[in-house]
Image (cartoon, helix red, strand yellow):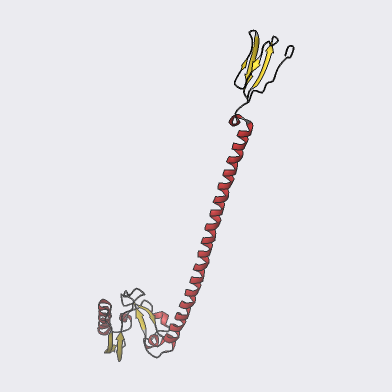
Amino acid sequence: LAGLPALALDPGKLLARFSGDPVRGLTCDAAAVRHTVGVVGAIELPPRFQETAWFYALCGLSGLTLLLGACRWRDGLMVRRQRKLQAAHDLLEVEVAKRTNELAYEEGFLRTLLDNLPDKIYFKDTQSRCVRTSKAHAQTLGAGSPAELLGRTDFDYFGEKHARQAFADEQEVMRTGQPLLGKVEQEDRPDGRVTWALTSKIPWRDKTGEII
């Protein structure tokens, strides 16, 4: 070994380099290096894997992979939610269109009856104000169209006596929920005329059964 500037040994996982005076009586095993007096020696262990650039590169790559995976999962979740919302929206539009057509049919059916039946038909709210009426009823009261009667009461078209009695009857029907059928009424007009009518009044209920 004399004259060599450095010596690389491989005792297992150890790396040894020696410099200085010529080495005499050098022995080496897998655990350590022993040398004679006057010889300067150093043992360099290779870095552990977690201390290498490869380890840090793999950690960075793993973190980036996890981040990309989380982003893809989030994007996929948002896409699935949007698809569910779109499906619910489409279903709602179908239901709305279906119900709209049903209401239009019912409205047309009712309007046909109110415009053509000779009977005097009307609907009133809880204050006995007219909200819907037939064409025959509007003509009997001297109105140009059913729309003219909207929001009006019997006090606008009849004398005080008949108007008060009609109001009392309607309030009683709404209070009790019991219909008034086949009542003969004397109707006094503001111009002094007197007419007679056979009247039936029934409570108007909404879909929950409440009187409206």
Apparent side of residue 11 relative to residue 166 in the rendered image (left or right): right
Count of numbered circles in the view:
0
> Where does residue 93 sit, x and y in percent of width and height?
51, 69
Query: Compared to 50, does 206 lie above or below?
Result: below
Name of the residue lying farthest toward the top: 38
Which quadrant does the C terminus fall into?
Answer: bottom left
Of residues 76 and 7, the one nearer the viewer is: 7
Q: Which image quarter: residue 45?
A: top right
Rendering quarter of residue 29: top right
Task: Say which of 38 and 25 sits in front.
Answer: 25
| Residue 161 position within the rendered picture, expressed as x and y whole percent measured from the top left | 25, 84
Residue name at image x 43 percent, y 83 percent:
110
| Residue displayed at 47% across by 82% down | 108
Residue 193 seen in this snapshot: no
Instruction: Report the front residue among 210 and 189.
Output: 210
* Residue 199 visible in image: yes
State the residue at coordinates (47%, 78%): 102
